[in-house]
Amino acid sequence: MAFTATVLSWAILEYRDQMEAVNQLEPAQQALKWITDFLLNAHPSQNVLYIQVGDPVTNHKCWDRPENMTEKRPLTQVNSSVPGTEVAAETAAAMASASLVFKTADSTYSSTLLTHAKQLFTFADNNRGSYSEKIPEVATYYNSTGYGDELLWAASWLYHVTADQSYLEYVTGENGKEFAQWGSPTWFSWDNKLAGTQRALNVGVIGIEITREEHF
């Protein structure tokens, strides 16, 4: 869900004029806000993020509308004791990118998203650990191959939102050397954001003539 929100935000930011021309900008923003409202509620405190609703084993036996499901639906969270860097960092990226989408239309909501994005990024970075290792029952369905790409992805979005050089240095410094695979990304997916990170930095940073405001 968080990755979907980040990519939807990116699409809105890249193709705002085209969406507006065919009367799809507002529906896209509404769809994004539905997700980010959910994510805000899933982040009740700085170092707690609820990442799953339901039991994947039970739920995969019932392919029905949520309204018809009566089974117990337990909540799963990551926190300081049970870290989940991937999901926390991706949620930070989702909120940071969405804060750009809503910056003009709803500045208060945009600021709220940015606050949560910063908190989640700090939580993800300071409490490193793979959620599919710490919560092994999720590995059967959405097993993560690593969290480095999510950290760089989130920092890149936070840089675009804030223009804070510390986020850029995070990506281009030691963390970039460790995780980025500069010049040789493979694919762009929910489990690998390196290509997206490099593309975002290429347009927003290396392309000096294109400022952050002009690009977005």
Image (cartoon, grey):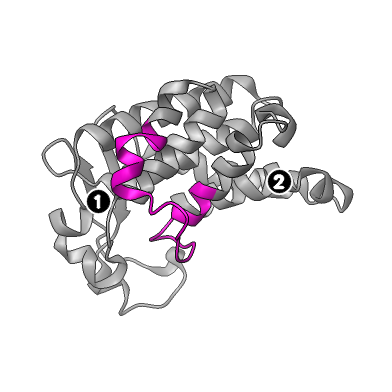
Q: Is residue 105 above or below residue 89?
A: above
In terms of image quadrants, where is residue 128?
top left
Q: Residue at x 32, y 44 (%)?
A: 177
Residue segment shown in magenta = 170-198
Q: How many labels were placed on the picture?
A: 2
Q: Image check: 72 left or right of 19?
A: left
Residue farthest toward the left in the current orientation of the protein: 81
Q: Residue at x 65, y 25 (%)?
A: 106
Mark 2 vs mark 1, foreground winner is: 2
Could one spot residue 66 in this view of the protein?
A: yes
Residue at screen point 53% across, 22% down: 162
Q: Quadrant of the C terminus?
A: top right
Whether the magenta-drawn stretch holds residue 183 is answered as yes
Q: Which residue is mark 2?
A: 14
Q: Amino acid at mark 2?
A: Glu
Could you tell me which secondary element the residue under label 1 belongs to? strand
Q: Are marks 2 and 1 in contact (CB under 8 Å)?
A: no
Spot occupied by residue 11 in the image (x, y as percentages of width and height): 66, 50
Asked whether 201 or 156 is in front, the reply is: 201
Q: Which mark is residue 50?
A: none
The kind of residue tagged 1 is: Leu
Does 130 appear in magenta?
no
Residue with the mark numbered 1: 75
Measured as percent of width and height from the top left, residue 1 is found at 45, 54
Give neighbour class at mark 2: few <14, some 14-19, many 20+ (Cα, 10 Å): few
Classify 19 as above or below 33.
Answer: below
Residue at image position (45%, 49%) is 2
